[in-house]
Image: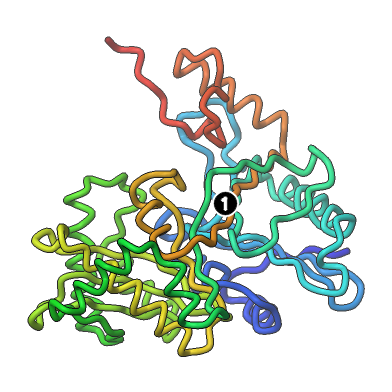
Amino acid sequence: MKTVVLKTDDPLWTEVLAGTAHDFYHLPQYVELEARRQQGEAMALLVTHVGDDFALLPLITRRLPATLKGIDDKFRDAVSPYGYPCPLFEGVHSEEASWQGEVITQIIAVLAELFICSAFIRLHPLYPAPKLATPSHGTMVRHGNTVWLDLERTEEELRKQMRKTTRNLVGRLYREDFTARMEDSHEALEQFEGIYTETMCRLKVDPAYFFGKQYILDLKKALGSSLHVCLVRHNGQAVAAGLFSEVCGIVQYHLSGTCSDYVHRSPTRLMLDYVRDWSKGRGNKRFHLGGGFGVKDDGLYRFKKGFSADKSEFFSWRIISLPELYEEASQEWARQSLSLDSEADGFFPCYRRPVVSSCR
């Protein structure tokens, strides 16, 4: 078994993806974009075995927080790019727990050799989760459900999946002359950016969900024809917009926004109704809507459930590859925050949780 550390400009990364099912989160261009946003370095671990067996795991490595005093600055940790960039297992033995266990053991050993203390990896709701053989392979944490549509069903079956109130509201929007279509132009992308920014400001979202204009332009450059812009218009005016990816038969509902004056009309419902039919018409197999904010059972999640009863579980995978260093960093975080329990709320890695000031 052999492991190679791939940089984003290594053609082997693209060659590997060309021969296996994946999502846009695995693309080297996307991982590089996310690494710049997260102020880290993009990489992928490629583990190969006899024959055609392999596993690919995209990661972003980051320096440990500067607040952790006394820890050598050669140490780093790793995180997935935003989204669902699960490890890909491919080959004759790809589904076997024993083989996956060997691969994961190898990955953890290589992380340690690279002075990477821990790794936080987001799994993909539509791909099988790794078969973790022992606790030494890390911890799987369930966060909640996401919603998806099976596009291999008939159009009639897909419409029956919709909640009755959702069907009625979508029908009303069509009758009131709202329209939706893909408009893959630079102007459409700029309209999306304006609507999305307005929406994020209105909702006062966590900065982690706030993607600026340059990022959105760079995302289109990275994904090219795999990224689509859908605009909902009323009387010619764009009132809602969304970004949708299309890779290997999976359409992802990535980002969206609605103009403040139209929030009460919920034109996003019409957009998702349109994209479902558009996706199916292009031969795709799954349309993934995602979950609520933080994968919670909230209003956003219930809104998405209005389109489908199909749901999948979303997990994160937490690896501690240098246990002694992780404990040292955690104790230093606890000392600074005056906390006796660094793992109290499940934040991982715990030493990256913001320190609560002791000032009163």
Above or below for 140 versus 184: above
**SS for dot 1:** strand
Q: Residue furthest top?
A: 360
The residue depicted at 35 percent of the width and 13 percent of the height is 358
In percent of width and height, residue 153 lies at 55, 79
- Name which quarter of the figure residue 349 lies in: top right
Structural crowding at the residue carrying mark 1, measured as other residues with C-alpha within 10 Å and reported as few (<14), some (14–19) or many (≥20): many
The residue depicted at 13 percent of the width and 77 percent of the height is 176
Residue underneath mark 1: 314
Q: Inspect this view and state whether residue 28 appears.
A: no
In the image: residue 316, left or right of residue 156: right
As rendered, which of 285 and 135 lies closer to the eye?
A: 285
Looking at the image, how many numbered discs can be counted on the residues?
1
In percent of width and height, residue 288 lies at 49, 67
As rendered, which of 351 and 283 lies closer to the eye?
A: 283
Q: Inspect this view and state whether residue 122 appears.
A: yes
In percent of width and height, residue 39 lies at 43, 53
In percent of width and height, residue 98 lies at 89, 55
In the image: residue 73, left or right of residue 257: right
- Name which quarter of the figure residue 15 lies in: bottom right
- Mark 1 is on which residue type? Phe
In the image: residue 284, left or right of residue 220: right
The residue depicted at 21 percent of the width and 70 percent of the height is 240
Above or below for 31 versus 351: below
